[in-house]
Amino acid sequence: MGRIKDIRPLKWTGEALLLLDQRKLPLKEEWVECKDYECVARAIEQMVVRGAPAIGVVAAYGVVLGAKEMAEKTKGYLDFKAKVELIINRLAATRPTAVNLFWALKRMRRIVEAGTDIEEIVVALETEAINIERQDVETNRKIGYYGAELLSSREVILTHCNTGALATAGYGTALGVVRAAVEMGKDITVFVDETRPYLQGARLTAWELQQEGIPYYLITDNMAGWFMSLGEITCIIVGADRIARNGDTANKIGTYTLSVLAKEHGIPFYIAAPTSTFDLSIKSGADIPIEERSEDEVLYCHCKNCRIAPYGAKVKNPAFDVTPHENITGIITEKGVINAPNEEKVLEFFSQ
Ligand code: MRU
């Protein structure tokens, strides 16, 4: 159909990393310019950029900016390597759950460890970051293709959080499946969970779908079960932040609830994620670290100028939950689909 837009959340200029400020969307399209690694680290912490694959790509560019700075400040390559290692550790400490961050930093660390010449290491790091970005878009297009193949010619897809171009280097994972299905000419309507408390659905997914002209309904999270019971949802597709080797999947808080509702109503429940989101060192979802975010996200409305709850209210705000593999119909990756995932199937998939 050729009407899919090329939304990108980041731009590398060679000297700086430009980030579309996702805190301001959908009302303002502003870019933050990062010229050093600390700016990149803060951008991840403060949600200028978010989404598992996107923070991996951005952190890789953070290493490039840091390495360029250290190349000017240090003499011997051993000193340079030690300083870049500290930068990698700083970037790794920004958010704990999405494993793509650590995956991308591991790729960057390998380049540093293999080199002996500072200038050559800096060039190789920049090439690697550009590759990570480019490969992410290619990967998402493949996920989109495999996912769209699973869908019939007419689907009403419920999605949660934002898994689109904004959450990746471009195109998206679960929302990439929606894009691919539309590109294939399928008749797709999307139900977008607003995704309390940070409202990635209402602010970001709705914005992306609007840009694309893909029909959608924005609903509050507590409406999802009701629409399932009415038979209005034919399929659920969400993203992932970390997948354990038994298929248990950490994703945005509220995903687990959707998976239970999907099971109750016999609706297919898919995870769409690149293979870089798998953490095979982790046996089950119980071992996935869950980020706890500021209570202000729950106590105040998103624009921060109105308090919702009484002063003194105690808050819990886990940013992610874990969906047990038994609730997952299939995990859609760039290498194909793992149906009814469990440890045996995941390990077999990765051994191919
Ligand atoms: O807290 P966020 O906005 O970074 O959480 C994002 C999600 O949970 C996404 O579903 C996940 O990272 C997959 S994005 C392709």
Image: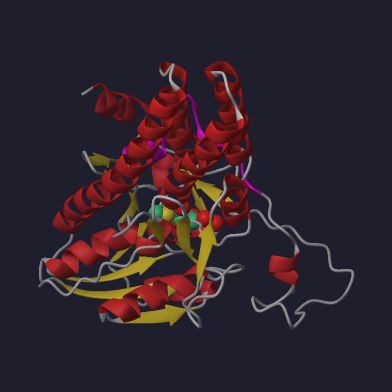
Left or right: 97 as drawn, with respect to 219: right
At a point 48% along the width and 34% down the height, the residue shown is 105
Colouring: secondary structure
Dividing the picture into quarters, in which one does residue 4 lie? bottom left
Point 56% across, 16% down: residue: 78
Q: Taking 171 as reference, is 351 above or below it?
A: above
The verdict on residue 293 being magenta is no
> Where does residue 201 sit, x and y in percent of width and height?
47, 70
- Residue 130 at x, y = what percent? 33, 44
Image side of residue 87 versus residue 126, left or right? right
Q: Is residue 135 above or below residue 166?
A: above
Toward which corner of the image does residue 82 lie, by quadrant?
top right
Q: Residue at x 21, y 38 (%)?
A: 335
Q: Residue at x 50, y 35 (%)?
A: 102
**Quarter the C terminus occupies:** top left
Question: Magenta residues, as a range?
Answer: 275-291
